[in-house]
Image (cartoon, rainbow, N blue to C red):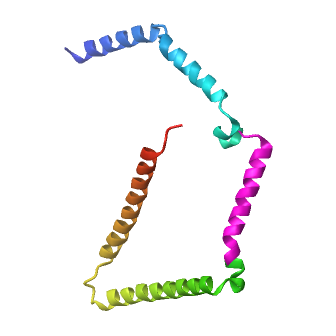
C-alpha cells in the first residue's frame, strides 16, 4: 500500500471515529459509582478526609497533636529533672554520638591516608546501598502492614 493511500485511509477512519457519539457507560458501572458516592457521603466525619472534618474537630486535632509533640519534647526541656536512669541513658546516647562522629572521622582519615586505593565512588556506592536497603526495608514494612491490616 502506498503512503498516500494509507494517509487517506487513516484520515477517513479518524473522521468516522470522531463523528461517532460518545458511548454510554454500562448500567452496572453507573450503579456501582452511584452506590460508592452514597457510601462515601454516609461515612462518619472521622472517616472522611481531614479537610472535610468539622472545624472544631480539626482545631482539637491540631491542638492535641501539638500537645503530644510538646509532651515528647518535655524530657529534653526538663533534662536536669530527669531521674538518674534516664539521665544516664541520655549521657550514654551523647557518648555514642561522639564515638560515631570519631569513627566517621577515622574512616575519612584512613581513606585519605590510604594513598587513593579507597575511591570516593566506593564510599558513595556504600552510602547509596545503605540508603536503598533502608528504603527497601521501609517499603517491605509498608507492604506487610497493608497485608495484615483489616480492610475498612
Placement of 25 over or under 117, stated as above or below? above
Which residue sits at x=39%, y=59%?
A: 137
Quarter of the view holding residue 105? bottom left
Q: Position of residue 58 (x, y in %)?
A: 74, 47
Q: Nearer the viewer, residue 95 or 103?
A: 95
Q: Nearer the viewer, residue 148 or 31?
A: 148
Q: Position of residue 116 (x, y in %)?
A: 27, 85
Q: Is residue 25 visible?
A: no
Q: List the single residue furthest toward the right.
A: 56
| Residue 127 lies within the magenta run | no
In screen coordinates, is 144 left or right of 118? right
Placement of 135 over or under 121, stated as above or below? above
Which residue sits at x=33%, y=86%?
A: 111
Counting every numbered tag in the picture gives 0
Q: Position of residue 113 (x, y in %)?
A: 32, 92
| Residue 64 lies within the magenta run | yes
Q: Nearer the viewer, residue 47 or 123?
A: 47
In screen coordinates, is 109 left or right of 43? left
Which SS does the magenta portion mostly show? helix
Quarter of the view holding residue 117? bottom left
Q: Position of residue 61 (x, y in %)?
A: 73, 51
Placement of 15 over or under 109, stated as above or below? above
Q: Quadrant of the N terminus?
A: top left
Which residue sits at x=48%, y=45%?
A: 149
Q: Quadrant of the C terminus?
A: top right
In screen coordinates, is 2 left or right of 86? left
Which residue sits at x=62%, y=85%?
A: 87
Q: Is residue 93 visible?
A: yes
In this picture, which residue range is highlighted in magenta? 53-75
Amino acid at each position: 500500500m502506498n503512503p498516500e493511500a494509507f494517509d487517506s485511509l487513516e484520515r477517513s477512519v479518524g473522521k468516522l471515529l470522531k463523528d461517532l457519539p460518545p458511548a454510554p457507560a454500562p448500567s452496572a458501572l453507573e450503579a456501582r459509582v452511584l452506590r460508592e458516592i452514597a457510601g462515601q457521603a454516609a461515612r462518619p466525619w472521622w472517616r472522611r478526609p481531614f479537610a472535610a472534618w468539622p472545624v472544631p474537630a480539626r482545631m482539637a486535632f491540631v491542638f492535641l497533636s501539638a500537645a503530644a509533640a510538646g509532651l515528647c519534647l518535655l524530657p529534653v526541656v526538663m533534662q536536669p529533672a530527669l531521674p538518674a536512669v534516664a539521665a544516664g541513658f541520655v549521657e550514654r546516647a551523647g557518648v555514642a554520638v561522639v564515638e560515631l562522629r570519631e569513627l566517621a572521622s577515622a574512616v575519612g582519615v584512613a581513606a585519605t591516608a590510604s594513598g587513593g586505593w579507597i575511591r570516593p565512588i566506593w564510599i558513595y556506592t556504600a552510602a547509596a546501598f545503605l540508603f536503598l536497603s533502608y528504603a527497601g526495608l521501609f517499603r517491605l514494612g509498608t507492604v506487610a502492614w497493608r497485608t495484615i491490616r483489616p480492610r475498612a
